[in-house]
Image (tube, rainbow, N blue to C red):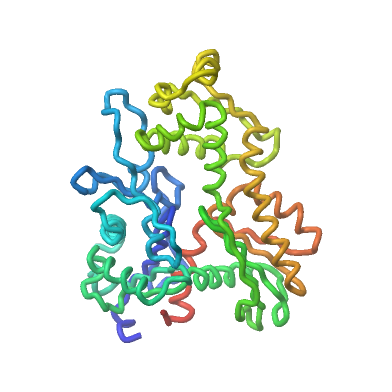
Amino acid sequence: MEMTHDIRIVVGIDFGVKHSTFAYAYKSTPSKIFVYNRWGFIGQFKTPTVLKYDESFNLISWGYSALSQKPNRKKKSFETKPVENFLLYLSQTNYEPYLPEGLHYKKAITDYLKEMGNFIKETLMSYWPYHNFFENVLIIMPIPAEYNDKAIAIMRECAYNACLINEKDSLRLQFITKHEAASVHCINVLREYNISDGSTFIMIVDCGSGTVELTTQKLLENHKLGEITERSGDYCGGYFVDDEFINFLGRKVGSSAIDHVRNNHCGQLQYMIQEFCGHVKFPFTGQQEDFIPFDLDLELLCPAIKQYIKGSELDEMENMEWIIDLNFDDVKAMFDPVIERILQLIRTQLNAIRSCEAMILVGGFSQSKYLQRRIKQEFNQRNINIIIPAIPSITIVKGGELFYYYFGTFL
């Protein structure tokens, strides 16, 4: 690449539909990749891809602060909805997520990248105060393989408008596919295991927030991955456990009450989901002895819902003093239908290939101890090595960094 001699820092941006993050490394020490891990609280490697605007489309907040909103009874009864899923406008689907009337998806993408970019610049400046961002920083952004040339051009335009680059066609912003990023990171992981190369098939199971994607590739000599031989996927990622949680609530308080809160008090609903994730979903192992019961106090977490509960559900909630107990079986029932769909995807792909020596779990939902245990229970008996990187959720962003150091060629 022409500008390689000017590059001192390589930044990887994982701009995802549901969550995003960034990583950085100094060119002279490429093995030391730092993934930002202070989103919301220390140890959190990603922040929600969410924005919140006022009535004039001035940005109020982004990331966690745009979603997790602790209820405040003094606030007005109607709240502006968080803007999320806007990256889906670049995908090859007919689904167009909610956007407030008058807000274009390009503005949402630009605003998010600008906030992320400001954060990146501040972080780099604290470590390397004498660098020139536009001259000395290379940005690598892994994108979905389905993005066409038009989508890539729009992403580049938004990055330019967000001041990530100072020229629209700057070589200091480069794109690779998310699968390429994941594959490079997986090659790095395989080096730590005694996996024979030359004729072995490796399955990469990418369990994200929304989608689960499976790819099978041949492991060539010198631990290089060949062309994809099988690919499949489905919408059965971690957020579908959240959906099961909302369905569970609907059975307790009535589906109409949930609909009213979703439409008029979305911040409170999202806050309750975040509390569920932090206290229940993330720690859940699927083992009864590990489970700690959780009391869902509606008066504290979602007080607005009380006005919408009617009939027998109202009587029941008043008897329970507005507290819903979440027990082990309740939570297991939220996970099981989602995990079963993932297991079926894996079964189907395994039946389509001759053999598989290793299965690598990547993506945010792969951090679920319960999902890991279910996969090991079923597929270890087929003599498949189940490999789980230390932090599966940062596979894409670390792979983007490694891709530059290994290859230096881009889309």
- Residue 14 placement (x, y as % from top left): 42, 62
What is the quadrant of the C terminus in the image?
bottom left
- Residue 58 placement (x, y as % from top left): 20, 48
Residue 117 visible to an observer of this rendering: no
**Which residue sits at x=61%, y=77%?**
228
> In this orientation, which residue lies closer to the viewer: 169 or 213?
213
Q: Is 224 displayed left or right of 381 in the figure?
A: left
> Compared to 377, does 133 lie above or below?
below
**Which residue sits at x=37%, y=44%?**
64
> In this orientation, which residue lies closer to the viewer: 230 or 96?
96
> In this orientation, which residue lies closer to the viewer: 154 or 170?
154
**Which residue sits at x=70%, y=34%?**
288
Which residue is situated farthest in the left direction here?
Answer: 56
Q: Quadrant for residue 359, please give it.
A: bottom right
> In this orientation, which residue lies closer to the viewer: 331 or 264?
264
**Which residue sits at x=66%, y=35%?**
290
Which residue is situated farthest in the top direction here?
Answer: 319
Q: Is 397 displayed left or right of 293 in the figure?
A: left
- Residue 268 placement (x, y as % from top left): 39, 33
- Residue 120 placement (x, y as % from top left): 31, 59
What is the quadrant of the N terminus in the image?
bottom left
> Compared to 84, does 320 lie above or below?
above
> Compared to 253, does 357 lie above or below?
below
Which residue is situated farthest in the bottom direction here?
Answer: 2
Numbered circles on residues, count = 0
Residue 181 visible to an observer of this rendering: yes
Q: Is 153 displayed left or right of 261 in the figure?
A: left
